[in-house]
Structure formats: structure tokens, C-alpha cells
Image: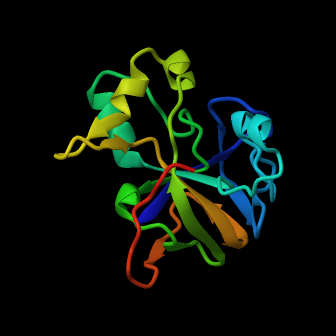
Amino acid sequence: MKVVSVSRDGQHRFSKQVTPAIRLLAGLGVEGDAHAGTTVKHRSRVRQDPGQPNLRQVHLIQAELLDELVGKGFTVRPADLGENILTRGLDLLGLPRGTKLSIGADAMVEITGVRNPCAQIDNFQPGLLKAVLDEDEQGNLIRKAGIMGIVLSGGEVKAGDAIHVELPPEPHFPLERV
């Protein structure tokens, strides 16, 4: 379980820019990223209630999703889908809410929920929204566009850093949209 790439963007754009390292700031998010802060920064959520807590400080996607999308004919590279941290070898969508991820030497992120992909993803590449949605055996919607978290402990994160998982106490609760 490791970090494949890291990215940030100081503007509210769909994709971010890959960078050699990012700095996570406790209680805020990714230094220099448009979504950093204690209150929500996602534009549609700010319009609803700008004072709500920011449960989307860090966006993580598993590289295996990019592999799957490339296999379906899409052109997607690290940071294209707006993630801050691209991982490999870790089933992000299978983690319960409240899982803590130790990343690199010092950083720790607590998982708050799953990203709900919006129609903007089809503006990036037509058909991509449908490709990042799926159904389980019971017909429940599966959102595959990554998970969101808050920064508990700050620190530098870069490609190649190890990721260690600490599950919350049971009972475990599945990820919901945040």
C-alpha cells in the first residue's frame, strides 16, 4: 500500500497538478489547495451552507480505478480526476468510515466518506460519469471516484510513501456521500 502520486491546485478546477510532494495541514487539508480549510470549499456545498465543516479536505483515489478506466478506452492520468493522493494496493472504497490512514512519516488522514461524482466529470471526458458508477449484487449504487478525508496530523506526503491502515472500533459503518 503506497502513494503513487500527489497533486494540488490553488484554483477550483476539475483536474489538479501533479507535484513532487504535498504538505497536509492538521484540520485544514492540503497546503495551497483550493479545498483546504475548516469549512466546506466545494462550490455547490458553499452555496447550500458555507459554514458547514469541511469533511472533504483530502481526496484519495486508487490507481486501480485509473487502470480500469484506461482499459475501457478513457485517457486518464494522475490528478486528472482531481485527487490529492493517488494510491495503489489499498481498497479505498472498502474501508469503513473513521478509518485512519498514516501516510509517510507524519501525516494521518481520517476517512469521512465517499466522493459523489457529478456531471462535471462528463465535461472532462464524455461517458466518464457512467464509467465511475457501478452497482453491487443488490442493485445498490457504487461510487468509484474516490474517498474523502480530514487531516488529523500534518506532514509531507510524496510518491512512494507507505500507507498504513488503522480501522476504527467495531461496529464498522460503510462510507456514505460527503
Instruction: Name the residue furthest front.
Output: 48
Q: Residue at x 64, y 46 (%)?
A: 7
| Left or right of 45 on screen, residue 77 | left
Query: In the image, is 41 to the left or to the right of 64?
Result: right
**In front here: 4 or 131?**
131
Please tell me which residue lies in front, 128 or 106.
Answer: 128
User: How is the structure coloured here?
Assistant: rainbow
Give the vertical position of 23 relative to 103 (above or below): above
Residue at 39% of width from left, 18% of height from top?
127
Give the total number of marks visible in the rendering: 0
Q: Percent from the top left, x then y, of residue 136?
A: 22, 45
**10 left or right of 99 in image:** right
In this view, which residue lies farthest toward the left? 137
Q: Taking 144 as reference, is 93 above or below it?
A: below
- Dividing the picture into quarters, in which one does residue 50 lie? top right
Q: Residue at x 39, y 62 (%)?
A: 174
Q: Position of residue 157 (x, y in %)?
A: 64, 63
Left or right for 106, reference 169: right
- Residue 95 percent location from the top left of the image: 39, 65
Q: Is residue 18 above or below residue 104?
A: above
Quarter containing the N terminus: bottom left
Q: Which image quarter: residue 167?
A: bottom left
The spot of residue 141 in percent (x, y) is 33, 41
Q: Give the residue drawn at x 53%, y 35%.
A: 81
